[in-house]
Image (spheres, helix red, strand yellow):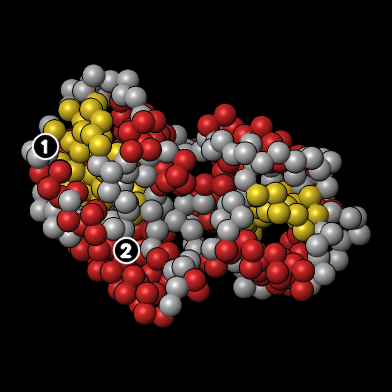
Amino acid sequence: MRIGLDARFFGPQGKGIGRYTEKLIESLEKLDQNNEYFIFLTKVGFDLYEPKNKNFHKVLANYPWYSFKEQLLLPRLLNQYHLDLMHFLHFNKPLLYKGKYVVTIHDLTHLKYDPYASTRSPWQYLIKYLLYRLVSKAAIKRAIRIITVSEFVKNEIIKHYKINSNKIFVTYESTFTPAEMLKMENKFQLPAKDSYLLYVGNAYPHKNLEKLVRAFALAPIEQEIILIFVGKIDYFYERLQKLVEELHLTNRVMFAGAVSDENLKSLYQNAIAYVFPSLMEGFGLPGLEAMANDCPVIASRAGSLPEIYGPAAIYFDPNNEKEISEIIKKIVEDENLRAEIKKLGQERVKKYSWDKCAEQTFDIYRSLG
């Protein structure tokens, strides 16, 4: 077969989807020596990716995500390669592409929580929101197979789009060793061991970080600890910083920005716990990265997180500040509990493998051949 992969998210600029794209291709290269693959990449990804399998060919497709070029020019490029099967690794499949395809749906967050709603004019927001809905619905309805990263997302797709469950396949993602984490620039003095709680990720509204800050302020903890946020400082983090100032917590909350691999590894390993208060997650990779680095996890009882973390996390209602604060107090003050959760986390991460993800994906390709 001639198989195409829309890998335009490849590399650090693609964040979580970029990681999925990179690791899926890497594992497929090891797995499949027979089929021919065409990997469509932006200029950044094209420069980063070097095929290690002679059957894998990189193709420059320098069309930005969610753009008119993506909708108009990408289908023409794909058609030139006479593909037997195309795999779109995100919902943004061009409406004009008529070939046989598989699509990966990581979550349906964009239907409920548009992160840029508060930064655009109402008209800009409405137009983009309607286009998102149109493109994602068309991609899901017309796909010959749908891949998701959790049973939670599978059930969301069935509920929202009335799709036959036999058409949807769950392939769990996996975690990363610290050396594989994104290379960042900021250097700073690492806090002392067991002196802080940690959050790693963006500050989009559905991440629920304002609720976390308020709960942290309420937590009746005797020892002095701080809350550290790791993530590139943008509009949403700046808004969170203003809340911290309003609550007079500037001496108890630290914004580390983007940090180096070495610092991120140390931050995970020396934290009291990783806190994940999100209202909606398709998979929840940061919590697994914390577990892989021997950091206990406390997380929201929402989205896919209970499914992915299982018994290896302590859960709270993300809408209940009092409950969040009580769980924070519990994990901070109970050293035995932290040791137990760490042990469960180390076992939990063994459940997930990129090679297994690729094998299941390849089985789908093969069934369509």
Instruction: Where is residue 338? Give x, y as percent.
Output: 75, 46
Numbered label tally: 2
Which residue is more in the foreground, 158 or 86? Answer: 86
* Residue 324 in view: no
* 237 relative to 274, above or below: below
Residue 85 relative to residue 231: left or right: left
Residue reaching furthest to the bottom: 122
Horizontal side of residue 84 vs 22, given as left or right: left
Residue at the spot 57% in from the left edge and 47% down from the top edge: 286
| Crowding at mark 1 (Cα within 10 Å: few <14, some 14-19, many 20+) | few
Residue beneath the point at 13% across and 58% down = 96
Label 1, label 2: how many angstroms apart (C-alpha)? 31 Å
Amino acid tagged 1: Tyr
In the depicted structure, whether residue 259 falls above or below residue 141: above
Quadrant showing the C terminus: top left
Frontmost residue, 221 versus 75: 75
Label 1 secondary element = loop
Are dots 1 and 2 in contact, CB under 8 Å? no
Residue depicted at x 23% and y 27%: 57
**Residue at which label 1 appears:** 81
What amino acid does circle 2 point to?
Answer: Ile
Query: Which percent across, then down, holds residue 213?
Result: 72, 66
The N terminus lies in quadrant: top left
Q: Is residue 263 visible?
A: yes
Tell me: residue 252, above or below residue 10. Answer: below
Q: Residue 215, image x and y in percent? A: 74, 68
Q: Which residue is mark 2?
A: 157
Q: Quadrant of residue 37?
A: top left
111 or 281, which is in the foreground?
Answer: 111
